[in-house]
Every structure is written in structure tokens, then in C-alpha cells.
Amino acid sequence: MHKLLKDHQAGDHKMSDPRKNPEQQPVTACLLSAAFFGALGSSFIYGYNLSVVNAPSLYIKAFYNKTWIERYGEPLAAETATLLWSVTVSIFSIGGLLGALSVSVIIKVLGRKGTLLLNNIFALIAVLLLTLGETAKSFEMLIIGRLIMGVDSGIALSALPMYLGEITPRHVRGSIGQFNSILICLGVFTGQVLGLPELLGQETSWSYLFSFLALPAILQLCVLPFLPESPRYLLIEKKDEAGAERAFQRFLGKKDVSQELEEVHAEARAQDNLHTASVLQLLRNPAVRWQLITIIISMACYQLCGLNAIWYYTNGILQEAGFAENIIPYITLSTGAIETLAAIISGLVIERIGRKPLLIFGFSSMAVFFSLLTVFLNFQDSLSWMPYLSYICILAVIASFCSGPGGIPFVLTGELFEQSYRPAAFMIAGIVNWLCNFAVGLLFPFIQETLQAFTFLVFVVFCVLGSIFLYVVLPETKNKTFMDISQSFVKINKIPVPSPGHEMELTCKPAMNGKVQDVVKMENSF
């Protein structure tokens, strides 16, 4: 009888542990639709806006000058023209910062899916302003449109990774999370293609480049309402167990989702605060200190690793290599194509290789190729074939970035924090991301003017330091529950976090004690 009792207890404990023997179901159409259309109306729009103003820049500047003459009867001064164009480009980052600051409040009220849907309103308003600015003879409309589009991107880059991380089974969480990076790269590439002179990169049609942004926003508005909300949000924050169960069933394609529900319940029981934590609470909590430091450094390196500076050199290097001016835009397309291909490959291998190796490989490779590029740039005038090597290095830097650093920091932000701290964590990550983005845009011209060909050595330092930090601090998170990931930081935080097993033991202990007493009574009666 004692043996039967032990077997019975062991069996109960095994069945109640949701971390063991995960059912690796095939990815469902519902999950893929949520990932693709969620990213299409969010990440794609962000990526498209990174490249869309490059091709028509001369025509936009000419429009500014023409409008100024019509208003004031004199040409636009060179300093004013430079200022207006700088504001047009950089205000996108200011909007992104505003979006990142507001996202935690919006998500708390509307949820993950609701925030993504609301965000399309910002995108469509921005499209109208950007498209009609030339017709209305108002460059202010273009500047305000860029600001609002930045707000859209700031919200999207926080809400989308959060949504994807919470709806995805842990064995494919990294791959589905990489839809964010893939669609960013695809957006950049699409902006380059549509900006070609044969398409919309002409003086008479450049405003239609901005009209195209309405398409992904409308597609998301048509599809996303029919897909479920995050089951974790429904269960933990809305206390809607029936809704969470239905959401899990649709995303996972199976009827019995009791294991997934129990995993979320265990996560909820282990949290000190079941309500959504504020940024101040997150900053003060020592139990998540190193998770926060890791995200801040990863996000800072995401912007400070130097990829944005690469675009400054590409056209100049191609001209030095002897390529004709009229074919350079077509060769530049190779950068967007390499970006997209590397992001897709990263999404396919991330669950096998892991987040940590891909991040370290990406930053380390960028440091190597930036160093080589510095050497080749210094000898560019000496040897006729040297510019070709410089261009190969540029492609290698882009591929290295998209292999890991281009998307994984967003995945990690969702993985390193439990439910109540996740919105605040994404808000901080977004603030760091957009501030660093703005700093690079502001400071890079001065750095380039001072250091010339040695400019990229500054980015080598950030890449190397980022790699070392991630190697020392970051645990591997692939195929782990959010509770398991929290446990990985216990030692470095020096604050014990209750394990899922301990939580379940506390929960099941009264019931098990009752079973033991019943069996003992039966034995005594014999």
C-alpha cells in the first residue's frame, strides 16, 4: 500500500508539472496569421519608413524650396533648408520615443491585440498627411506626418513582440518572434524597390510612396479582429479563464490546453504583484535588476552597433568602385535583399542554435567586418579593386546584424520578464532604443567629420563590449517557460524567485495531505 501511495503521488506530481514533456504541436494557421499580419501592420511599416525618404529626398527638398518661394517670395536659405530636412528625418525618432512612452498605458487598457489595432489609426492619419502635403503646399504636413508615423512605430515595436511572445508555444517562440525582424527588413527592401526611378521615385509620383503605407495598415485592420487576444493577458490581467482557454485552443490547434493554462496559473502565483507594474516599480525591484540591465544594454547595442551609419557610406563606396551613377540604386538593393535573407535564416535556426549564440555571433562578426572595412577604406585610393572589398564588408556587416542583433533584443524583452513587469520593460526598452537611435543620427555626422575613415572603430568598441556582456550575463532562453527564465537570474540577482515546482507543491500540498490521510485510514481499518 505504501508503494502504491508513493507511485500515486509521483504520478500526480508528474502530471501537474507543465514544464515536462511539452507537446510540440505543429504551428497552426491561426498563429502564423497572427504573426504575419501583426508584423505586416507594425514592423513592416517601421522598416519601410527607414528607407522611404532616401530615394525622393531631392524632390522633397525641391518641394520645400518651391513652397517657401510661393509663401515668402524668396528662395529657401541653405541653412534653413538643411534644418527643415534634418527635422523631417529626425522627428521620426522623436515620435518613436513618444510612442514608447505611451505604450504601457495603452496596453493596460486595450490589451496587446487592441493596441495593435488602435495603432493603425496613427498610421492612416500619417499616410493622409504625408500624401496630401504636396497637394496642400504644406511641408508642415510632411513633418507632422513623420512625427505621427514615428508614434506608430514606437508603439508597434513594443506591442508586437509582447503579443507574439505571449501567444506562442515556447518551442517556437524565437522563430515566431523573428517575424518582427523579417518584416522590418522586408519593409526596408520594399521602400528601396518602390523608390526606384522606374516606379515611384520620380518628381511627379514621390508622394505615392507614402500612400503605399495605407495597404499594410488596412490589411491588419481586416484580419487581426478575427484573431484571439493574448491568452496570458486574458487570464492574468482580465481574469477571463474561458477566454484564455479559447485563445490557447485556437493558437495551438488542440482542445486540451489544461497544461498551458496551469503554466500561466503557476506564473501568476509566483508573482509578487499580479497587477501591471509601473516603470518605477520595475526599476526598484531587485529580483529583476539584471534582466533590466541586460535589456537596456542589448537595446543600446542594437542602435549603437553602427548599422545606421553603414547607409551613409554605401553610395560613396559604389561610386569609388567605378559603378555608373544610374545603376547604383539597383546595386544598393542588394543591401536590402541581404538584410531580409539573413533575418529569414535567423528565424529558421534560432530554435536550434539559441538566442545567446546568435547575438554574440552577430555582434562579434560586426566588429570583425567593421575593422576590415576601416582597413579597406584607408587603402581605397591606393588600389583600384579595394572598393569592391569595402562593399563586400558592408554586405557582411548587414548580414551579421540581421543574423541576431536585428531581432533578438525584442524577443528577449518579452522573455526575460513575467507578465506584470512586461509592459514596463518594453517601455524602458523602447525609450533606450529611440534615444540611442536619435543620438546616432545627431552625433554621427560630427564623428564622421572628426575620424573620417576610422569612424567605424567607434562601433567596434560597442560591438565588442556588447558581446562580452552577453557572454557573461545572458542565460539561454530557448524552449524555457517564463518562470524557468526568471530562475536563471536568481543567482546574479541574489534574490530567490519561487520555482514553478515549489508553487505547485504549495498549491497541491493540502489536497495531497487529504489523500494520504484517507489511505492511512483505509490501512488502519484493515
Image: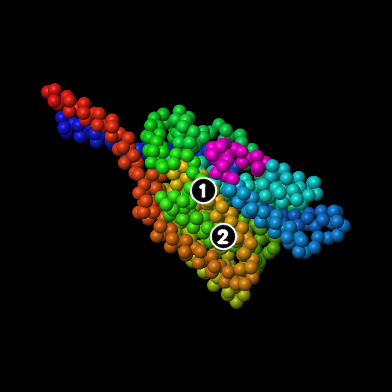
The earlier-in-sequence mark between 2 and 1 is: 1
Q: Position of residue 131 (x, y in %)?
A: 73, 46
Q: Classify 476 as above or below 234.
A: below
Mark identifier at residue 279: 1
Q: How many marks?
A: 2
- Residue 245 in which image quadrant: top left
Disc 1 residue crowd, few under 14, some 14–19, many 20+, Cα 10 Å: some
* 16, 124: nearer the viewer: 16
Q: Amino acid at mark 1?
A: Val
Q: Position of residue 38 (x, y in %)?
A: 56, 41
Instruction: Name which residue type carries label 2.
Output: Leu
Image quarter hosting the N terminus? top left
Tell whether 33 sits left or right of 355: right
Q: Is residue 374 visible?
A: yes
Q: What residue do we see at 63% from left, 60% from top?
A: 441
Q: Which-is-in-front pick, marks 2 and 1?
A: 1
88 and 402: which is toward the camera: 88
